[in-house]
Image (spheres, helix red, strand yellow):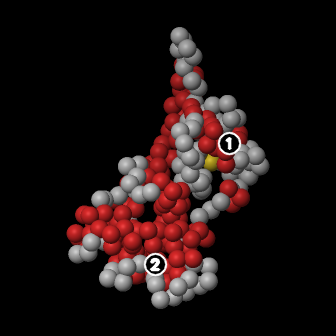
């Protein structure tokens, strides 16, 4: 189960408790009709959560998941569609916001050590993405370490090789030291990408993209809280 979903059986049961509680509250639009739960009855809550986690973790074709659970592909689709937004909502409390970042701490940009920004639509440069979040408005960028994509934002970044020239030896050594520090964040990114939905073909309706990414971020921090 862990290698399929990224969670232990007990952690999945705890997620089910959160989902059940949310669906019993007036805050849940999917559950306003108490006779209709947001998961297929043939699966039940636990298996529906497992299906949703499997889909987000492995990004498997829904027909394959359906075959493994002995149900139809539309049933899997209903489970993913129903459970994902509920998980997104119930896990919000586990996700730190930009307001939670300490103005005196040093941060390595690009990863998920303390905070993950909301998804940015379209194909944009790294600098555009971080400025779009406005996270640097109240924080000192001089305490942040980023890669070359963040040059010009006042952060600690490697030197870029000048056009038609070479870096001085001290600049090369400086870059090596910065990259040693940034190795930590690269490992975090690699860990986050174990959720294959983040870096493989997205097959659900495009309108669900932001919701899906937010759900995965919630699951990521929820798992950290459980460790």
Residue at the extreme bottom: 35
Q: Where does residue 37 sit, x and y in percent of width and height?
A: 46, 83
47 and 109: which is toward the camera: 47
Residue 108 locus on image (x, y percent): 59, 45
Residue that mark 1 sits on: 131
Crowding at label 2, few (<14), some or many (≥20) Cα neighbours within 10 Å? many
Question: How many angstroms separate mark 2 from mark 1 (CA)?
Answer: 37 Å
For the point 56% across and 31% down, the residue is: 148
Q: Look at mark 2 in the image and give the residue it sits on.
A: 38
Asked whether, in this view, residue 133 is left or right of residue 72, the answer is: right
Counting from the top left corner in percent of width and height, residue 91 is at 55, 70
Q: Are marks 2 and 1 in contact (CB under 8 Å)?
A: no
Q: Horizontal and vertical percent for residue 176? A: 51, 31
Q: Quadrant of residue 96?
A: bottom right
Q: Quadrant of the N terminus?
A: bottom left
Check disc 2 and report its element: helix, strand or loop.
Answer: loop
């Amino acid at each position: 189960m862990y290698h399929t979903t990224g969670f232990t059986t007990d952690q999945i049961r705890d997620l089910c408790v959160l989902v059940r509680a949310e669906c019993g509250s007036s805050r849940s639009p999917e559950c306003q009709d108490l006779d209709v739960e947001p998961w297929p009855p043939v699966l039940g809550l636990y298996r529906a959560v497992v299906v949703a986690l499997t889909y987000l973790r492995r990004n498997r074709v829904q027909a394959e998941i359906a075959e493994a659970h002995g149900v139809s592909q539309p049933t899997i689709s209903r489970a993913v569609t129903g459970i994902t937004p509920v998980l997104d909502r119930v896990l919000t409390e586990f996700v730190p916001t930009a307001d939670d970042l300490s103005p005196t701490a040093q941060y390595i940009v690009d990863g998920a050590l303390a905070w993950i920004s909301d998804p940015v639509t379209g194909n944009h440069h790294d600098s555009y993405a971080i400025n779009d979040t406005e996270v640097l408005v109240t924080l000192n960028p001089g305490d942040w370490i980023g890669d070359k994509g963040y040059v010009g934002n006042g952060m600690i970044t490697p030197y870029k090789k000048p056009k038609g020239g070479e870096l001085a030896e001290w600049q090369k050594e400086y870059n090596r030291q910065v990259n040693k520090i940034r190795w930590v964040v690269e490992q975090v990114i690699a860990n986050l990408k174990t959720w294959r939905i983040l870096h493989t073909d997205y097959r659900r309706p495009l309108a669900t993209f932001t919701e899906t990414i937010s759900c995965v971020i919630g699951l990521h921090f929820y798992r950290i809280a459980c460790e």
